[in-house]
Image: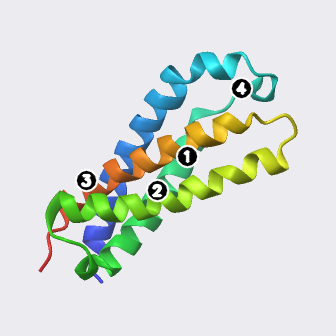
Amino acid sequence: MNWNKALIIGVAGGIVLWLYNFVMHGMVMAETYMGNAVFRQDGNPAWFLAVEAGMAFGGALLFVKTRAAWADGPKGGIMFGSFMGLVAFFAMFTYPLVISAFPYYLAWCWGGIAVIGWMLYGAVAGLIHKQA
């Protein structure tokens, strides 16, 4: 496995995921969160960056290890991101089950946001790591 490619994809993809999620959750969805009592807590943005970095590096390891299975360039990366996004999408549906008063529609919103974010991540990964 090419650890340098994994590190580069992890850093670049992590930045893309972090910026995308900042825009989606910090700007687009902010008004929705302000109107819901479940989200009446301040979060430390450094934790979001740390979690995004961990997910991005894990995704990079998986992408580099399975690179031969995906088409070359961004097209293959987007396909990889679609599958990663589907895993994240279904994971979002645990929140209404375990958090009291969590709005069910937000699970759909978060799932859709996750799929698009991972597709962007995959496009970046596909651009960085070409097939051999």
Q: Which residue is mark 1?
A: 111
Amino acid type indicated by mark 3: Val
* Corner quadrant of residue 125: bottom left
Distance (Cα) linking label 1 and label 3: 20 Å
Q: Is residue 20 left or right of residue 41?
A: left
Determine whether the residue tagged by mark 4 lies in a helix, strand or loop. Answer: loop
Q: Which residue is mark 3?
A: 124
- The tag earlier along the polypeptide, 2 or 1, is 2
- The tag earlier along the polypeptide, 2 or 4, is 4
Disc 3 + disc 2, Cβ < 8 Å: no
Disc 2 + disc 1, Cβ < 8 Å: no
Foreground disc of the pair 3, 2:
2
Amino acid type indicated by mark 1: Gly
Q: Which residue is mark 2?
A: 85
Disc 2 + disc 4, Cβ < 8 Å: no
Residue 55 location, x and y as percent? 50, 58
